Amino acid sequence: MAKFSLRLRLRLESRANPSALMAWLSPLLALLLTVLCGAILFAALGKSPLAGLSIFFLEPLKDLRGWSEVGIKVAPLLLIAVGLAICFRANVFNIGAEGQLVVGAAAGGAVALYFDDGSGSIVSGGGAAMIAVVLLAGMLGGMAWAAITAFLRDRFNANEILVSLMLVYVGQLLLSFLVHGVLKDPEGFNFPQSKLFSDDFLLPIVLPGTRLHLGIVLALLAALAGWLFLSKSIAGYGIQVGGAAPMAARYAGFSSRKSLWTSMLICGALAGLAGVCEVLGPIGQITPSVSPGYGFAAIIVAFVGRLHPIGVIFSSFIMALFYIGGELSQSRLGMPNAITGVFQGILLFSLLACDVLINYKIRWSK
């Protein structure tokens, strides 16, 4: 008998003219796919898909308190995503924003603890001036941590992806060392955490009756400043040209070295600011778990926002909904605590799939 075999292979073929409109609609399509996959997931776990999606996406927005809690999550995500958008536009793949956030929180929190002695003096009494100093210390801490990656990339051509990622774990261990040592509250029953900050050192509440703090205002200002920097400044234009066409950038006189340092330091400063806003805001002290993974989630936020400082405002809102919705689904539906990460992963996978299909055609070949 004659043997018959047929082998079909999939290959991607570049589209001659990818749709610009579909490229901008890709995040929306990815979100719709995420909702669909979420419904299937709830059904597979024996939960009502409509009830699950309602708790996940609608329940957090039913009242003012829910909106404010979403805003608390938006603040760090937006701050970090703006910095990452600038880095990625410069073709600098900073994956270590989580570490920069952690070090910024430790640096700013340490400064706050140093001055916050409860004596009621002009300096130790806190107030706007001292809060500004603490915020600046957090930004400098994040910048210093980002500068390590920039230096190793600049001096030794080290891969910034690996270096920045490994520094995340170093930063987390450094924070753990501090809260188990010199920053530990001596009256805290040996728990690894600092003492609570005085009220005058905490960020002001911008919405009375809620926990929404000044960090959300700083995040929105950062998004506006990032948009102005990229669209209206020569340095921002040089960063974008260098990221899109390095050869053309060098020919035009733009320094790739300057773009590296500028983008990394901006991202480090914003990540550090996000970290110190957390310890001066909803946490109120330094703990080993300052962040639930905002630095990594902000990578998804940046790409869903199309690496645009204004676009990340909307994508950070969606990601914040994932965090709050995940917490509600755990308490009300008994879902596992990994549900937030699952939705984040589905959103990223859906976005990548949409982008691939917008730019490529699928062809069958023998």
Image (spheres, rainbow, N blue to C red):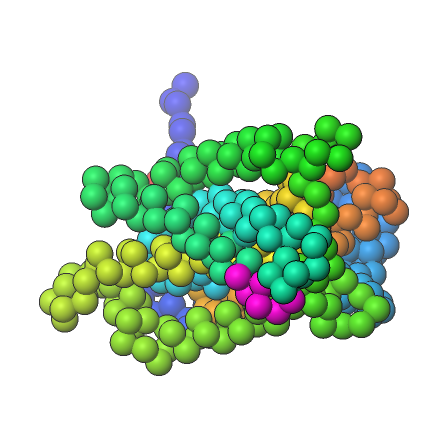
Quarter of the image holding residue 210? bottom right
- Whether residue 150 is visible to the viewer of this picture, yes or no, is yes
| Residue drawn at the location 55% of the way across and 51% of the way down | 111
Left or right: where does residue 314 sit relative to residue 245? right
Q: Compared with residue 133, is residue 21 higher up or lower down, i.e. above or below?
A: below
Q: Compared with residue 344, is residue 354 higher up or lower down, i.e. above or below?
A: below
Q: Which of the image's four quarters has the C terminus?
A: top left
Quarter of the image holding residue 245? bottom left
Q: Position of residue 118 (x, y in %)?
A: 71, 53
Residue lying farthest to the right in this orientation: 332
Q: Main secondary structure of the magenta part?
A: helix
Point out the stretch of residues depicted in magenta.
127-133
Left or right: where does residue 84 sit relative to residue 340? left
Q: Which of the image's four quarters has the N terminus?
A: top left
Left or right: where does residue 19 sit relative to residue 316? left
- Whether residue 304 is visible to the viewer of this picture, yes or no, is no
| Residue drawn at the location 51% of the way across and 34% of the way down | 174
Q: Position of residue 199 (x, y in %)?
A: 74, 59
Q: Position of residue 93 (x, y in %)?
A: 37, 50
Does 200 appear in magenta?
A: no
Q: Position of residue 98 (x, y in %)?
A: 51, 46
